[in-house]
Structures are given as structure tokens and as C-alpha cells.
Image: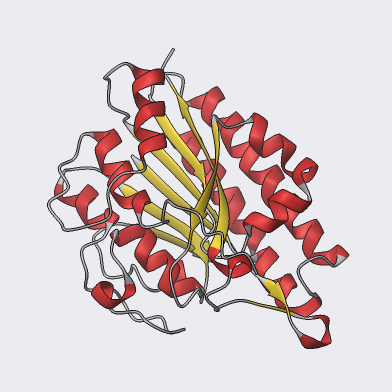
């Protein structure tokens, strides 16, 4: 193994979003992603965004993008940047999303293994609420994003099926009443664990993730013409094959730690 790890951590998402909104970051967190700061300056010329949509498909590794680049074509074309990103250890879902939305490492936010307690650490959602903005989470029931960010005075749309989650997120875009929408899809991760990362069923789930992200971007451009919008395809961790042809993650290895993110900014018209 070559030990080539991405240089920008997923924990940078927190400070990046705050900076683009013009919200002061009062915590001791990871710095904003310099690529995103440069993109915002290029696309907006000093204006701040007023909407953000963060799509969180689970377990989309960088090596999948490298090996099956053509399968990500629509996501790449819908975005301004494709950025290799580094996960956190242990590279399991609640730990990773906790770091993504708090801006701090597991030793600070406190989730250090596969468990789903409600975070007491300051999150991106808290920062939005403190600044008079409306965040919303759309996720499947029982999954990490539907549990670890609870107990905030915000709206949660939790459903039993992926189809209901994705339909509701589109409805929220239509309504245009939230400043931040976070959407979780765990279909690739679930199928990858059962069948292996490259089997036909999980690869079809990955295609669905790319297709849905592309549809989100199209809806943003159609319905949010009067907004400066930041959007992203932001997985939590990668994956690797284990004995028996199944898939797993959680190790300090390139396959699990390196993920691919796509980002874009749509200026108002």
C-alpha cells in the first residue's frame, strides 16, 4: 500500500459552509477547504451564499472514482470541483458525519466508535440556528444522520425508505423555505456490505446516488434562480472488500480513508 492520503479532511466542510454564508466560526475547528474558498471568490466575487444543499451518499470511496471514473460523469459535469477528501478514524459512519458537521476530530466531539448518541458538541446546525437560519435534515430512520443531530430546534424529515427521503428533499427544494438542507442516502453502503463494493447490485446503488445528485443540482438551478447556492456530494468514508466477497470499512487504509467529494456553486441569476 502506498499510503497516499488526501490532504483535505472532511472536517473542513463545517468551516467552509460557515465561511461561505458569512457566519463567524467561533470554535477551534478545521480550517475551510481552500479550494472551496477560491471557488466561492471566483463564482461570487465577494458575495455570500444564502442557500446550501449537502447530499451525503454513504461509503463512496476515492478508488471507486479512480477505477470507474466514467460512472461519475454526470456528477462531475453537474459540479465545479471533484476533490479527493480524507475521512477520520475510525472510518465508520457516525464518527465521520460527526466530524463533517462539527469541524472537529472524534476525540473532541466524542463519538469514537460505531454508536449513535446525540451530539452535545456544537454543530453546523447549531451555528445556523444561532444566526437565525433554518436547517433541515432528510434521512432514513435509524441511520446516523437521523440520530446524532437530534434535539435541535430544527426540522427533521425521517422516513423508512430511500424513495421517500429523496422525494421529500425535492419537495423542500420546491418550497424554498430552508437555508441548509442535508440529505442522507445509505443504499450503496448497505449493498456494499452485503455483496462487496464492486458487485452489480451495489454498483447500481452507486449509479442511483450519482443520478440523484444530478437531479438535485438540476432542481436547484431550476427553482433557486434568485439564490447563491452551494451544493455538494459529500460521502463520509470509503470501503474495501473482505473475505467472502463482502464489503467493509473502518480501517486506517487508503481504501477506507480517501473519499471523493463533488462541489458546486450556482450564482443567482
Q: Residue at x 57, y 32 (%)?
A: 79
Q: Residue at x 36, y 67 (%)?
A: 98
Percent of width and height locating residue 100: 38, 59
Q: Residue furthest front?
A: 2
Given residues 176 and 38, the one toward you in this image is 38
Figure check: 125 above or below 77: below
Relative side of 262 to 181, left or right = right
Q: Residue furthest top?
A: 269
Figure check: 146 above or below 116: above
Percent of width and height locating residue 216: 58, 38
Figure check: 230 above or below 24: above
Q: Quadrant for residue 36, please give it.
A: top left
Q: Residue at x 46, y 84 (%)?
A: 114
User: Total marks drawn?
Assistant: 0
Q: Residue at x 74, y 71 (%)?
A: 191
Q: Residue furthest bottom?
A: 244
Can the viewer see residue 160? no
Relative side of 48 to 57, left or right = left
Percent of width and height locating residue 24: 15, 42
Relative side of 263 to 51, left or right = right
Q: Quadrant for residue 53, please give it.
A: top left
Given residues 55 and 168, the one toward you in this image is 55
Figure check: 95 above or below 64: below
The C terminus lies in quadrant? top left
Percent of width and height locating residue 48: 27, 26
Can the viewer see residue 45? yes
The N terminus lies in quadrant? bottom right
Amino acid at each position: 500500500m502506498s499510503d497516499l492520503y488526501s490532504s483535505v479532511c472532511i472536517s473542513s466542510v463545517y468551516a467552509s459552509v460557515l465561511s461561505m454564508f458569512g457566519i463567524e466560526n467561533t470554535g477551534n475547528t478545521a480550517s475551510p477547504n481552500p479550494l472551496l474558498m477560491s471557488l466561492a471568490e471566483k463564482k461570487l466575487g465577494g458575495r455570500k451564499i444564502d442557500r446550501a444543499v449537502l447530499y451525503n451518499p454513504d461509503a463512496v470511496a476515492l478508488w471507486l472514482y479512480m477505477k470507474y471514473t466514467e460512472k461519475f460523469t454526470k456528477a462531475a459535469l453537474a459540479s465545479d470541483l471533484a476533490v479527493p477528501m480524507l475521512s477520520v478514524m475510525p472510518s465508520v459512519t457516525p464518527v465521520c458525519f460527526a466530524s463533517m458537521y462539527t469541524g472537529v476530530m472524534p476525540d473532541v466531539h466524542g463519538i469514537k466508535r460505531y454508536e449513535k448518541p446525540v451530539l452535545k458538541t456544537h454543530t453546523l446546525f447549531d451555528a445556523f440556528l444561532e444566526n437565525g437560519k433554518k436547517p433541515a435534515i432528510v434521512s432514513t430512520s435509524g441511520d446516523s444522520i437521523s440520530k446524532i443531530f437530534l434535539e435541535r430546534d430544527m426540522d427533521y424529515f425521517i422516513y423508512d425508505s430511500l424513495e421517500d427521503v429523496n422525494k421529500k428533499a425535492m419537495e423542500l427544494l420546491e418550497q424554498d423555505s430552508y437555508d441548509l438542507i442535508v440529505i442522507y442516502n445509505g443504499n450503496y453502503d448497505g449493498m456494499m456490505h452485503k455483496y462487496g463494493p464492486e458487485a452489480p447490485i451495489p454498483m447500481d446503488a452507486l449509479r442511483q446516488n450519482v443520478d440523484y445528485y444530478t437531479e438535485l443540482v438540476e432542481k436547484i438551478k431550476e427553482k433557486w434562480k434568485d439564490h447563491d447556492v452551494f451544493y455538494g456530494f459529500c460521502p463520509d468514508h470509503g470501503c474495501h472488500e473482505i473475505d467472502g466477497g463482502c464489503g467493509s470499512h473502518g480501517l486506517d487504509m487508503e481504501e477506507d480513508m480517501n473519499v471523493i467529494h463533488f462541489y458546486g456553486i450556482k450564482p443567482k441569476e
